[in-house]
Amino acid sequence: MKLLSNNTIENHQFEIEQAIEFADEITICTAFLKYSGLKELLRGINQKEFKTTFFVGTNFYQTEPSALKQLFNDGHTIYLNRDKTPTFHPKIFFFRKQEKVKFIIGSANLTSGGLITNIETSVACETTTDSIIYKSLIEELLFFKTKSNKIEVLETIADYENRYKIYRQKHQNADLEFEIEEQVIIDNEKKREEERLRIIEEQNQKKKQLSKLKGKHYDRFAISNEYRESWQNYFEEFKSFKNENNGNTIIPKIHPLYNWYKRQRELYNHKDENGQRAIPPEHLEQLNNENFFWGNPNEIQWMIKWEINLKLAIEYSKARNQPYTWVYREKKNPNFKYKRQSQWCNDQRMRLNGEPTKRKITEYEIKRLDEAKFLRESEEENRKINEEYILDKLVLIENLKKERLSQNIRKWLPSQNDSNPQIADLGHWLNDKLEWIKLRKKNKDEREIVDLIEKQLQDLGINTEHGIIATYFDDDCKKYLEMRSKFPVDNPRGEERKPYAEIIQWASMNKNKFDTYPLWRQEKLIQIGLVKKSPNS
């Protein structure tokens, strides 16, 4: 169970987008539906091979007809609640993938405010289809169906749109009348505020005059003793935030530390007539040591998203015990949840290499990537961590080979689909490394380290040119040669046959299917003497 809030980087929109990628069934219930919120999720929803079910309320005519039309035209199922009482007010985001279930229930409607900017709170839960809460949730959705009408034709939305326009026009007229009355109230409030500020300004002027008399210069960038005494405590809180957020130094507005963070930026950006920054040098040095982000404040939203991607990339890398940060795309894994971070890693590598992109990489980003031990393009830069890491993986494969062959298990290589997650992870690594070798050899890149790793894999008996199937084929060829060294015929009889029963069957199959095999396999069969003819061209 997880508490969601728009007061954090991972807000409602972020959590719902993650759940959409996971699901093969989606149901969304919302009291208010607006296109501003729908468009944030529509891309992910429409990429699915199935259609989403929506239960939508119409009370107070907050739901926009344009959003309903978009869903209808995209082929999604819409149930519209048009009862005036009781008010239809649930906010449920339901996601299922086979027996796994995720749902979010709380205050957030499907609007941009609900997903991003409003003060909203919800609870995200994970369960299974055999749980009590799942069954209760399904019962509730069935109840919603009895209280709603399914939209079968576009005219239903047109009817609602007519009432929507009348209601909005009536309220617009009422709002105009109220605005006139409200303006009078605002003007009075403004006068009171101006008077209050005038009094404060008079007091400030008196303070300035007093400070001048004392030979002191008074301004808002002056550093008081009280500020200096409290600064270190705030700085320690800042370091704690950084540690808890994988090195991120950008404080969101809703965080209690934000005013202090904002003050550091103000002092940093203010210079006196001599070009001296207002921030104390000792504070600046400590903040720079922590890689404080001094960049353009307009880039803050970009950097928040950037930091989220880095955080998830680090999370993935730690889960795989990688000594560096990099997300490998697991194409064969339908539940792979780091697709975006895989593309993000490639984008950062392009930016580091100076390749054309929308945004030039900043010094701050370079330092953050270096802190996270991001895997750069050049193997030379990563060689130290790679060599030790690769050696560990090779030892694991060698031990697995010994263990399985001692148990007469023919397929000794680690599989990506193994039920043991550690062996499956080893299988992912081996597959990635074989693809990496092929690509580097094709592009003629980094030949020294490519040749070294290729030789280490070949010493284990792995066919680096044609992959895992070819490795097992090579093992069978060796077994066949072993049999022929003992017996001059392909098909020994009696007791002699028993140890080689499988390889005799293998030899017969390869003879019969010789013409269907690729050239490399045909050449190998001729080389070991199983087939006495030329390979197909």
Image (cartoon, helix red, strand yellow):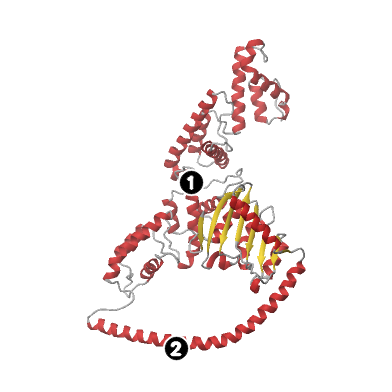
Depth check, front residue: 54 or 376: 54
- At x 51%, y 55%, the residue is 2
Left/right placement of residue 211 relative to residue 32 reads left
Q: What residue does disc 1 label?
A: 317
Q: Which of the 4 quarters of the picture holds residue 481? A: top right
Report the Cα–Cα distance between label 1 and label 2. 59 Å
Badge 1 amino acid: Ser
Callout 2: helix, strand or loop? helix
Q: Where is residue 537 in the image (x, y as percent from the top left)?
A: 71, 30
Say what amino acid the circle numbered 2 marks: Lys
Q: Do the residues labelled 1 and 2 touch (CB within 8 Å)?
A: no
Compared to residue 17, the image places residue 398 above or below, namely above
In this image, 172 relative to 124: left or right? Answer: right
Q: Which of 520 and 124 is in front in this view?
A: 124
* Residue depicted at 63% across the width and 17% down the height: 500
Q: Counting other residues with Cα less than 10 Å from the Cα at mark 1, is it few (<14), some (14-19), or many (20 or more)?
A: some
- Look at the numbered disc 1 and give the secondary structure of its residue: helix
Which residue position holds label 2? 191
